[in-house]
Amino acid sequence: MLIRCVCSDFYKMKRTPILWLHIAAPLIGAFAFLGYYSMSVNSQPLARIDAFLEALCVVFPILIGLLCGMAAAQEEQAGSYQVMLAGTKSRATSYLSKLFLLLILSAFSVALAIGVFAAGYHAASAWFYLHAAFAVWGGTVFLYTLHLFVSFRFGRGASIGLGIFGALITALMLTGLGDQIWHWMPWAWSVRICNDMIFALQTPSAASLAAADIQCGVAACLAATVLSIAANLLWFQRWNGSKSNE
């Protein structure tokens, strides 16, 4: 049933901008950085990779806010969410279908962006790029659950606004302010884990410290993500499709 619902949601999104944004945005970003680096004389390859990953992580919250808002608006326009709420025997299936499809599309976007960049910039191993892609994607799963809740409950505008706020927090967490608190900030997980991976490559003697920092962030990310999915499922079971601004 879940697979059928995911396929159904995919067909509903097939002719919407949601799919094209998952393709166009990563391609534009990857080619923009590759084009700039081809003309730049900067000789620090790891710093270039770090800049690309940071930009990817900063932009992602805005895209998540927009895409989740669009997905929720589609369901609202189709019948005030009633198709989603009453279309299956289990509401959990409907919610997980929407979440899983967005996560699948997100994984595709991250793989496309980092894959294209890696194909044009060979300053790191394929193994590193694979870990970076998983870090970028894994750190955003919580954000998808958060934005789906905000989109369903408060509307697309609130989700986009939260995405812009999240992008600002992500950029702020790149400063010294984030050194001690980033483990507890959902918008910082992806970017700080990637930073630690780059730091471990640049400073092999501090690799163990970077690994410990990553482990702490991953533990917080996993715990928060599992709890957020469970909380959203409980809420969705009782939601009647109304929004707070109605």
Image (spheres, helix red, strand yellow):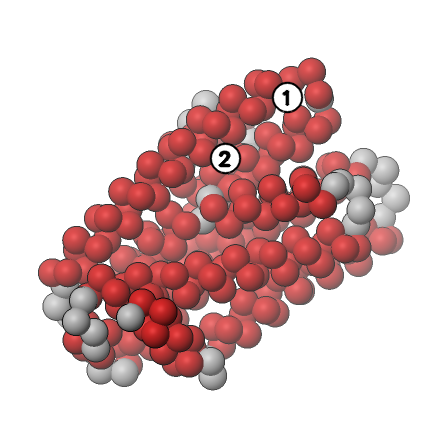
In the foreground, 117 or 77: 117
Q: Is residue 209 above or below residue 50?
A: above
Residue at the top extreme of this rendering: 205
Q: Report x, y in % for residue 17.
A: 49, 77
Q: Report x, y in % for residue 2.
A: 31, 67
In the foreground, 97 or 232: 97
Question: 115 left or right of 100?
Answer: right
Q: Which quadrant of the figure has residue 126?
A: top right
Q: Where does label 2 land, which residue?
A: 173
Look at the image and tell me in which quarter the C terminus lies: bottom left
Q: Provide the secondary structure element on which disc 1 rests.
A: helix
Question: 13 left or right of 151?
Answer: right
The answer to whether mark 2 and mark 1 are in CB contact below 8 A is no
Q: Which quadrant of the figure has residue 164?
A: bottom left
In the foreground, 167 or 15: 15
Q: Where does label 1 land, which residue?
A: 207
Residue 17 seen in this snapshot: yes
Q: Is residue 179 above or below residue 41?
A: above
Q: Residue at x 44, y 26 (%)?
A: 216
The amino acid beneath tag 2 is Met
Q: Provide the secondary structure element on which disc 2 rests.
A: loop
Q: Report x, y in % for residue 13.
A: 42, 77
State the CA–CA distance, disc 2 to disc 1. Answer: 21 Å
The amino acid beneath tag 1 is Ala
Residue 160 seen in this snapshot: no
Q: Residue at x 15, y 60 (%)?
A: 237
User: Counting other residues with Cα less than 10 Å from the Cα at mark 1, is it few (<14), some (14-19), or many (20 or more)?
Assistant: some
Question: 113 left or right of 173?
Answer: right
Identify the mark nearer the N-term, 2 or 1.
Answer: 2
Q: Residue at x 41, y 50 (%)?
A: 141
